[in-house]
Amino acid sequence: MQEGQKVGSGSQLDGVNSDQFRYLNKNRLKTAEQFRNVFNAGKRSIDSQFIILATENLLGYSRLGMAIPKKKINRAVDRNSIKRLIRECFRNSTIVEKGYDIVVLPQNKIDVKQKERLKNSLISHWKKIHK
């Protein structure tokens, strides 16, 4: 690393742009209207772990929203763990570059400890959405 460069500031390290590994502010659904548009017009992908709603946008990049209710996942630690896992899978996916608005909802009985199973579920959802 060169002197004066900060890690995570979008700098170039060994020819790799560190921004491509971050969950940027522009990649988030923020307003109720944005969520409502996805809920009303989105296509659905459902399995035993997650319900994914997605609709195409004209931005050229995807945005992610999560609705992880306390009613379905009681412990805050587990809710935050699920959110981190969803963000990580989203960041590492090629769907980020495609132009979708995506909302992720958990199913009733998610086993938070089975992270690999949850990751595989999300990866298969991203593929279904992009078809």
Image (cartoon, grey):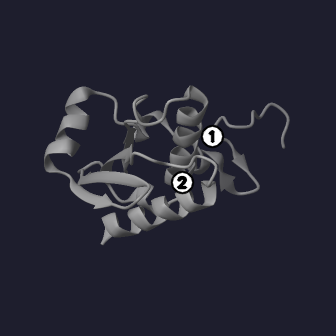
Q: Quadrant of the C terminus?
A: bottom left
User: For the residues marked 1 and 2, what is the alpha-carbon distance in whole angstroms?
Assistant: 20 Å
In the rendered structure, the answer to whether residue 113 lies left or right of residue 52 reads right
Q: Residue at x 53, y 64 (%)?
A: 120
Neighbourhood count class around disc 2 (C-alpha, 10 Å): few under 14, some 14–19, many 20 upward: some
The location of residue 37, given as percent across then percent down, is 18, 40
- According to the image, label 2 marks what residue? 89
Q: Return the x and y of residue 75 as percentages of the image width and height.
A: 55, 29
Q: Position of residue 117 (x, y in %)?
A: 57, 61
- Residue placed most toward the observer, 50 or 83: 50
Pointer 1 residue: 10
Q: Are marks 1 and 2 in contact (CB under 8 Å)?
A: no
Q: SS at mark 2? A: helix
Amino acid type of the residue tagged 2 in the rendering: Cys
Left or right of 64, for residue 85: right
Compare marks 1 and 2 and give the one earlier in the sequence.
1
Q: Of 116 and 41, which appears nearest the observer?
A: 116
The mark lying in front, picked from 1 and 2, is: 2
